[in-house]
Amino acid sequence: MIDIRYSAEVAQARASGAAIVALESTIITHGMPFPQNVETARLVEADVRDAGAIPATIAVLDGALHVGLEAEQLDALGQAQNVAKLSRADMAACIATGGTGATTVAATMIAAHLAGIHVFATGGIGGVHRGAENSFDISADLQELAQTPVTVVGAGAKAILDLPKTFEVLETLGVPVIAYGQDMLPAFWSATSDMPAPLRMDQATDIAKAQQTRTAMGLKGGQLVANPIPQEAQIPAEILKPIIEQALEEAEIQGISAKAVTPFLLGRIFELTAGRSLTANIALVRNNARLAAQIAIAMSK
């Protein structure tokens, strides 16, 4: 049996049937330094509560799968060293060997489904990396969306990726991609892109019904809700494009690959934008948390 431990708040929410939103933990361990990582995690949790739902930050601590972290656990994780970055391939091994790990999109979806949580808020999903035709570097997040019935709310896919190929793979896998409130897909730090949205929905209730209808039809998998970053917080794509290209070139020159690619690129883009990318990242995660709470409430009703 898997040792799943619920925080007191999440346990009470489960008992009462309250809406719950899953949150990942890699933003804490691999996204930004202490104490800003913990402060941001607490802000995102507060956004979920303020919107009427209960946050469940997910992590593996000493071999136990935690769904919801107590305040002291969140503090400890924010300062921990050498925390594993968990996806589908290594999550079970970390639990089996008593390890500690932070959950990516894929791992958070798995944990949320085990805990009966149907909605998950993140910054943006992983996807097809640029040059994947040679490296075959494609995030497990895409396959997870195709098989695990969790609605994922993010600002699209991370802009460092090959976005057209990422959305093409999602279409091939049969994953609904729903733009919230607009006809084009957002591009993470940028609210708009030149990619038309396969689907558009303007109401959280419609998004909730879409997932519930998939389940009723016996269709596997979840759905991606592409929620644009607030206009006042975005970085226009024309500003970001040369910065992303420079970071990608540096990663290739330094031979950075696999799980190290995304943290490196995000770090360099932070430096090259003088911190503006991190400010935008925090804004979009909080925005996604608020929408996810609305969807979770609609599902709970």
Image (spheres, rainbow, N blue to C red):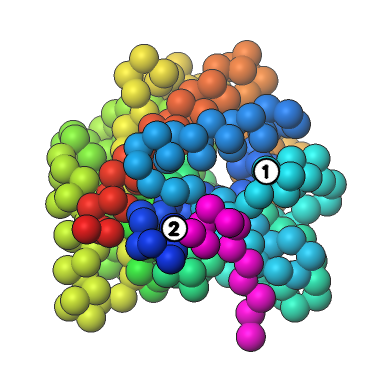
In the picture provided, is 256 more to the left or to the right than 44? right
- Seen in the picture, residue 287 relative to 164 is either above or below; the reply is above
Front in this rendered view, residue 216 or 225: 216
Q: Residue at x 80, y 75 (%)?
A: 97
Image x and y of residue 29, in percent = 70, 44
In the picture provided, is 292 more to the left or to the right than 298? right
Label 2–label 1 contact, CB within 8 A: no
In the picture provided, is 131 more to the left or to the right than 192? right
- Seen in the picture, residue 89 relative to 259 is either above or below; the reply is below
| Earlier sequence position, callout 2 versus callout 1 | 2
Magenta region, residue range: 1-12
- In magenta stretch: residue 287: no
Image x and y of residue 204, in percent = 21, 46
- In magenta stretch: residue 7: yes
Mark 1 burial class by Cα count in 10 Å: few <14, some 14-19, many 20+? few
Mark 2 burial class by Cα count in 10 Å: few <14, some 14-19, many 20+? some
Q: Label 2 sits on what residue type?
A: Ala
Q: Label 1 sits on what residue type?
A: Ala
- Seen in the picture, residue 210 relative to 51 is either above or below; the reply is below
Image x and y of residue 137, in percent = 57, 58
Q: Which mark is drawn over residue 187?
A: none
Q: Residue at x 68, y 27 (%)?
A: 36
What residue did someone put label 1 on? 71
Q: Residue at x 44, y 34 (%)?
A: 47
Image x and y of residue 237, in percent = 39, 23
Res 104 seen here: no
Q: Which mark is drawn over residue 13?
A: 2
Which type of secondary structure does the marked residue at label 2 adopt? Answer: helix
In the picture provided, is 165 more to the left or to the right than 61? left
Looking at the figure, which quarter contains the N terminus? bottom right
Q: Residue at x 74, y 44 (%)?
A: 72
